[in-house]
Image (spheres, rainbow, N blue to C red):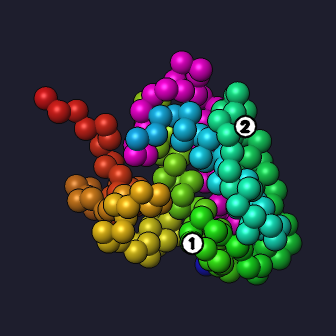
Amino acid sequence: MHMRDISELDRKAVDYSVTIVSKVAGADLHRPTPCGEWDLTQLLTHMAAQHRGFAAAARGHGADPAVWRMDPPADPVAAYREAAADVTAAFSEAGVPQRVFALPEFGPGFTAPGGQAIGFHLIDYVVHGWDVARAIDLPYALDPELAEPALRIAEAVPDGDFRSQPGSAFAPAVPNAAPSDPLARILSLLGRSPSWPVVVK
């Protein structure tokens, strides 16, 4: 995959997430999500904050912890749209995949090459787009162009007990009942049950 391609793939994932988030109504904001204990307001706030942080990192300001924080906005859907537009604009700037991103949320002093950092962002928004869709009972259709690269990134994410620690980006991997489905494989590798919510009878 060429470095310039990763930004375009990320844009597809982000644009689809915006389409899904735009269907969130005010009455949905306290619904549970597949993302740990977060309700939909908390998840959307986190997603917008990550967009802002990655946009700042692309522009050379990611080391500032303040750019990664966001208080719950009055309108989480509008705030999400704005943040998504910001990160898409930042990643489309010339030379971004060749820059070094400071990503303090991954650990003190952590940096990554731009192409790799955008890959981190891409997989996060494939999964978080699915999280929102499930929270509001919508189907999620993984773009065929994203399936193989997103699965490759998911397979490269280390698994282990550390994923059970507070603040971990993903829960431990779970068994996958549909190995031929790329989306199910991605979700399972990153600690999501593709059948969420599991109804216990």
Residue at disc 2, secondary structure: helix
Residue 173 as seen in the image, left or right of residue 121: left
Q: Nearer the viewer, residue 108 or 18?
A: 108
Location of residue 178 in the rendering, given as x and y in whole percent from the top left corner:
26, 56
Q: Tell me where the magenta segment starts and ends, as one range.
A: 7-36
Q: Residue at x 65, y 36 (%)?
A: 72
Q: Residue furthest left?
A: 201
Q: Residue at x 79, y 51 (%)?
A: 86
* Dot 1 amino acid type: Gly
159 lies above or below 54: below
Residue 9 as seen in the image, left or right of residue 133: right
114 lies above or below 188: below
- Quick check: can you spot residue 19? no
Location of residue 179 in the rendering, given as x and y in whole percent from the top left corner:
28, 62
* Dot 2 amino acid type: Ala
Q: Of helix, strand and loop, which mostly describes the magenta segment? A: helix
Location of residue 138 in the rendering, given as x and y in whole percent from the top left corner:
46, 33
The C terminus - image quarter: top left
Q: Is 17 inside the magenta-drawn segment?
A: yes
Q: Residue at x 86, y 72 (%)?
A: 94
Q: Which residue is mark 2?
A: 79
The N terminus - image quarter: bottom right
Q: Which residue is mark 1?
A: 107
Residue 185 as seen in the image, left or right of residue 97: left
Location of residue 126 in the rendering, given as x and y in whole percent from the top left corner:
53, 54
165 lies above or below 98: above
Residue 185 as seen in the image, left or right of residue 58: left
Q: How far apart are the two marked residues, 2 and 1, measured between alpha carbons?
A: 26 Å
The quarter of the picture where residue 57 lies is bottom right
Callouts 2 and 1 close, C-beta under 8 Å: no
